Image (tube, grey):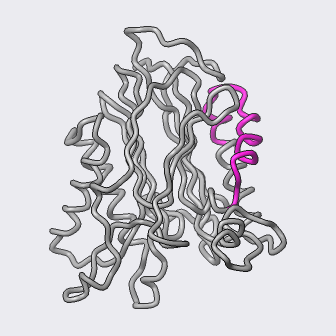
Amino acid sequence: MLSVLSYGRIVARAVLGGLSQTDGRDYSLITASCGFGKDFRKGILKKGMCYGDDACFIARHRSADVLGVADGVGGWRDYGVDPSQFSATLMRTCERLVKEGRFTPTSPVAILTSAYYELLQNKVPLLGSSTACIVVLDRRSHRIHTCNLGDSGFLVVRGGEVVHRSDEQQHYFNTPFQLSIAPPGAEGVVLSDSPEVADRSSFDVQLGDIILTATDGLFDNMPDYMILQELKKLKNTNYDSIQQTARSIAEQAHELAYDPNYMSPFAQFACDNGLNVRGGKPDDITVLLSIVAEYTD
């Protein structure tokens, strides 16, 4: 069974395609979440908004809407470590910091940094690695602030075109930047990046802008043109319509991931790196689909 979490049950007014900004109006995000865990976990949503080893959060504060995704590194399973524990704990900690007001909308990297160092200081042992992407909408300024570490990411679509996107961070093929907690004595062996090296961006948004935030399970299996085709089906800001479109995108990515004859973006990237690869990339998939709307409390 497909699990879908949906958020942003607010009264909002917006028109798809974008409207000119008007000073004095607060903005908000209406967001729907959908995803799949790969293999036997498909369609199962774990506690804490986790699809397989992916995790995500959506948090609301009086000054901002904040959302994030994280992709736990599956290789830890070979050492008896559940990769989902790290990504889930990271996202839960980010969510708590936002709800407690311990953040500044203009600095999502500070949210990620604070959450990561809380994990490092946690008295309960935690091992693992994860990518992370955080998106913040500042209600009053109508600006989006982002940070992205690794190969999760976001797209901003306006008028049927991608107007902003995150930059992927890779050390080398299929080895993204990642936050890690290693066993004692293995700190220099396990790949680990500082949250401070996350790619950052800030830009204005308009009413009706579509923001798609996802783990690499989506972007490795669906090129932009396929995503845009699905987003064209989103005709209004009705909550159910956003939910249905998020589901459609996640389902299509999941199907393509298991198509052995499909030349996926991941396969194309592999070929560009000298590898003979074809087919989709089976992976956990998390999709957060948001629309910028006028906020009415």
Q: Quadrant of the C terminus?
A: top left
Residue 214's place in the image compared with 81, above or below, is above
- Tell me which residue sits at (30%, 85%) in the image: 189
List x then y, in percent, for residue 213.
53, 47
Name the side, left or right, on which 91 lies relative to 272. left
Name the side, left or right, on which 46 lies relative to 14. left
- Tell me which residue sits at (39%, 64%) in the image: 88
Name the side, left or right, on which 157 lies relative to 128. right
Camera-side residue of 6 and 212: 212
- Tell me which residue sits at (45%, 25%) in the image: 204
Q: Quadrant of the N terminus?
A: bottom right
List x then y, in percent, for residue 218.
63, 57
List x then y, in percent, for residue 250.
67, 54
Q: In which quarter of the image is residue 59?
A: top left
Identify the magenta region. Answer: 221-243
Q: Is residue 75 magenta?
A: no
